[in-house]
Image: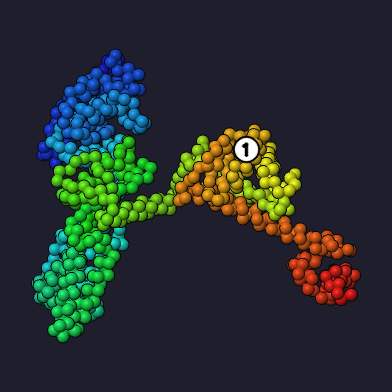
Amino acid sequence: MSSSSKDNPTPDNFSLKLPEEIIAGEGRTINEEKGFPLEITPDRSPEDLFYNKPGAQLRQKILSLPDTPGVYMYIDRHGKVIYVGKAKNLKRRVSSYFNRRHDSTRTNLLVRNIVDMRFIVVATEEDALHLENAMIKEYQPRYNVLLKDDKSYPHIVVTNEPYPRVFMTRDLSFPGKYYGPYSNQQSAKVVLQLIRDIFPIRSCRHPLEASAIERGKYRLCLDYHIGKCQGPCCRMVTREEYGRSVAQVRQILSGETVMLEKMLQEEMNALASELKFEEAQVLKEKYEAVKRYNAKSVIGAPEVGEMDLFAYVEKEDTAYINFMHLHNGAVVQSLNLEFRRRLAETPAEILSMAIVEIARRFERRFSEVIVPFLPDTEFEGVHFIIPKRGDKKKLLDVGEKNVRQYMQDKEKMAEKLNPELSVTKLMKQMQSDFRLPVEPRHIECFDNSNIQGTNPVASCVVFRNGKPSKRDYRHFIIKTVEGPDDFASMKEVLHRRYSRMMAEGEPLPQLVVVDGGKGQLSAAVEAFEEMGIRGEVALVGIAKRLEEIYFPGDTLPLYIDKTSRSLKVIQALRDEAHRFGITHHRLRRSKTQLTSALDEIKGIGPQTAKTLMKHFRSVRRIREAAPEELEKVIGKAKGGLVYTHFHPEDN
């Protein structure tokens, strides 16, 4: 087939449109060649495609790549950018995609879809990282890490007005100075409440133009009368005095709360020394409010100064990063980012992307940054600290705690919106933890109960989708085993349960749990082999002492993480089977004791005993009943027999 076939779409008209900030940067486009279609040609066989080998034209481009930092773009047969990457050495990095088969299936799929590439040379690896970030946002390639940022975070704004207002907003169009963002809306509300408790800043939306104030257009509102506003609308306060309150508000929002606390304390003491106790009391209330706020919001030592922090946690294919900017120990900016892996990106690569993203959003230049590990990119002028102990390690722990809470909140919200999602995640986790070929949607657990071999019973509880299905619970009275033989009892119960299910055509469970260690598990394995379902139904045993999970054929038990939801489900199964079995055993034992007590009375049959129990409810009440009461229930003759049996001394 000719490479110029008109039936096959080609990227011949492809033109690389770069964002303006890239065009204006230091990078330059080296490769201007046109693309070509994906075809099986003499130099590109189906085997080449399968083993990720580039065609002759693409191979030539790779060989001509420079050994310099830059950004590369992979393009598919439709001329669409499907991946953007950065490299410290372009030739080495791009070649690594094609000279081997990758562990990641998605990476292999990416390589098989590459028919052309472009690249841009830049001065440093950091420049490449910034360029990569901008181009990912421009093209949204399908194989790049996805930044999950579907929400706008609240800010607190101090407006540019003659008498400024202070309020929380997600709309950044108001003229003024913005502080934040606040990843937790509640945190922003706490700051606003502190400001309103201390400073009488107006909350109305009036423009308060000087001419309108002069004409007396406005009237004092309730806030003025309760001390929440100084009344600038009616010239009750000068702009200079109002401005001093706003300046102190800016101190709080800028993280200067420790300095503000000291300043208020000094002014309060000065007023008290001048015997101005009423004014000192007003400042004291402000001082105590700021002090309470600092106790909660200042997480580092004030002498630390400016400090930035990135905390990192990941779960499955999603990475979560918390950024905090501290000023004099107080958290001034905080933001959580969520990255969804598309290929096999390392934590170091994702951390680099997060640093660039934060720098772009906040227009920041970092100097000293606390991180859990080093990013994969060298940032000029940035000193990274990986603390192992001390105050900075405590700060990193706070960031990790915040990001873990963010991750848990996201998961809970997703599960609340889609309950089946939670069940599916649990089932997949249990399938992995217990090495199952399928998800254990149907689980059954067995437990034996007896006291010195008397009244032996067994219980079977059923969980479906990780929850009890009580209508499927079953009790078994042991019939063929004499004495306290738990192993033989387990074999009998399993035979009876699953032989009947197979005979009736009911679906078998995916997982069976026996309460006990190796002995009970071995008995269960024998029963399964005799029924021919060994291997068809998974089987495990759980030992009570250390919550050990035993598998058939394994000499050593499996220890599952104590916080794992998989283990919690198995524990719930075991406890429910124990409770259900004990309840049945007690009932059987009680009936046995009752029957033996009344059966000893000559002339009293089972029906009479049942009548007595129905009326008196217990043997104790029968024993304590007067002859007249017994006669009313079972007649004079039988009543006399019962009374004489329990009160032989009266004869």
Nearest the viewer among 232 and 441 is 441
Q: Residue at x 30, y 28 (%)?
A: 111
Q: Nearer the viewer, residue 66 or 221?
A: 66
Q: Is residue 300 above or below residue 203?
A: above
**Can residue 582 be seen?**
yes
Amino acid at dot 1: Val
Tell me which corner region of the image, top left, top right, bottom left or bottom right, holds residue 85. top left
Mark 1, Cα crowd under 10 Å, few <14 / some 14-19 / many 20+, is many
State the image coordinates of residue 14 (x, y, percent, origin top left): 20, 29
Query: Image point 22% across, 20% down: which residue?
Result: 57
**For the view shown, which residue lies furthest in the top direction?**
42
- Residue plotted at (24% across, 18% down): 56
Position of residue 213 in the picture relative to residue 438 (left or right): left
Expressed as whole percent of the image width and height from the top left, the position of residue 581 reads: 65, 53
Q: Which image quarter is the C terminus in?
A: bottom right
- All told, the count of numbered labels is 1
Q: Secondary structure at mark 1?
A: helix
Task: Tell me what residue is drawn at x 67 percent, y 52 percent.
Answer: 449
Where residue 347 sits in the image (x, y, percent)? 30, 42
**Where 162 falls versus 112 (above or below)?**
below
The reply to whether residue 157 is visible in this rendering is no
Residue tagged 1: 525
| 376 to the left or right of 274 | right
Q: Nearer the viewer, residue 58 or 638?
A: 638
Q: Quadrant of residue 550?
A: top right
